[in-house]
Amino acid sequence: MTKDLTHRVYEPKDIPRVLDLIMLALPQLPNYAMIVPDRDRIEYVLTHNVDNAEAFGGWVLCDTHETVYGFGGAWCVRSLMSMDFVADDIFMWVEPEYRTYPNVRKLVINYVDWAQARGAKLIRASHTGGSFPKDSREAMLYHTLLMRLGFKEVGSVYHLQA
């Protein structure tokens, strides 16, 4: 079995599998344990934004049979403080057995290229979901990937659970 996946913009046919991935991934993110994933809400967002790559974009990693094993989503909107565009990744997930440097890099590169094409002056990448503890192997590998792609670490995100 090859772990090398192809990447492309997600399509309506991908939504059921992407929903399954997101519903499985969210409970694994300890910093978001208080958030109850709503499958209908996620489906609504994916369905209504699949043709709206102006502000929202999404990409899949899939095998030669078009089975999806990874998904990344982001938005690019005007800053609240200026008329400049800023981009944020909102979800990046690759199934553990396909979580290789080349596959994760493909998702991040898709995001960066998409944000740059929309004129983003600031492109943020994070792994604030808390799926990987700060000093874990996975967190360090993702940090290294982001640094190699030119991102700079600028601080921490703090959560207060209400």
Image (cartoon, rainbow, N blue to C red):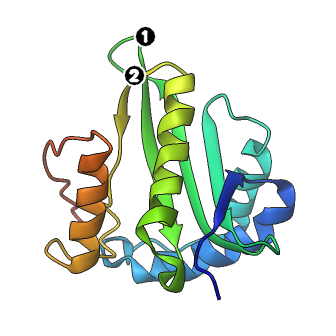
Q: Which residue position holds label 2?
A: 79
Q: Quadrant of residue 55?
A: top right
Circles 2 and 1, Cβ within 8 Å, touching? The answer is yes
**Amino acid type at image mark 2:** Ser
**Amino acid type at image mark 1:** Met
* Residue shown at 64% from the left, 53% from the top: 59
* Image quadrant in which the C terminus is located: bottom left
Whole-percent x, y for residue 99 in the image: 46, 75
Q: Which residue position holds label 1?
A: 83
Q: Secondary structure at mark 1?
A: loop
Q: Front-most of 151 and 32?
A: 151
Whole-percent x, y for residue 74 in the image: 53, 45
87 displayed left or right of 30:
right
Whether residue 48 is situated above or below residue 65 in the rendered picture: above
Q: Quadrant of residue 18?
A: bottom right
Is any atom of residue 162 visible in this view? Answer: no
Q: Residue furthest right?
A: 13
* Image quadrant in which the N terminus is located: bottom right
Determine crowd level at label 2: few under 14, some 14-19, many 20+ residues with C-alpha closer than 10 A.
some
Whether residue 81 is situated above or below residue 20 in the rendered picture: above
Q: Quadrant of residue 53?
A: top right
Whole-percent x, y for residue 45 in the image: 69, 52
